[in-house]
Image: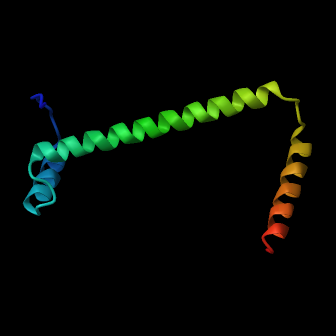
Amino acid sequence: MSVKASVSISKSQDAYARTLVEEGRYASLSAVVQRGLELVRAETEARDLETAALRALLEERAKGPFVPLEESRDETKAMLARKRSELGL
């Protein structure tokens, strides 16, 4: 179901959208705007999922033991060395 809405875009956005339609990439200006909104939705949903995953990771890490920065760096270096060795690098 379509809903009619009035939107304002800049002259350069209008020119670009019309070029896309003229080139046959989109059937209409509405199709260009709809695609743009879908891209914004996908980007927003992906960012929200990444943020939620990061929050969950931080919450999980906050529950664990405190590891001093230098010790953490040493552990990371050791892990990278193991991985490189396992991969023959």
Image-based side of 34 in relation to 62, left or right: left
Q: Number of callouts in the render? A: 0
Q: Image quarter for residue 59?
A: top right
Residue drawn at x 23%, y 45% as measured from the top left: 35
Residue 33 x %, y %: 19, 42
- Establish if 57 lies above or below 83: above
Q: Image quarter for residue 8?
A: top left
Residue 63 x %, y %: 80, 25
Query: Which image quarter is the C terminus in?
Result: bottom right
Query: Which image quarter is the N terminus in?
Result: top left
Asked which colour scheme the image uses, the reply is rainbow
Residue drawn at x 15%, y 46% as measured from the top left: 31
Residue 20 x %, y %: 15, 57
Q: Looking at the picture, tell me which residue is in the foreground, 15 or 65.
A: 65
Please, which residue is most extreme toward the bottom here?
Answer: 88
- Establish if 22 lies above or below 32: below
Q: Image quarter for residue 22?
A: bottom left
Residue drawn at x 57%, y 31% as measured from the top left: 52
Residue drawn at x 48%, y 38% as measured from the top left: 47
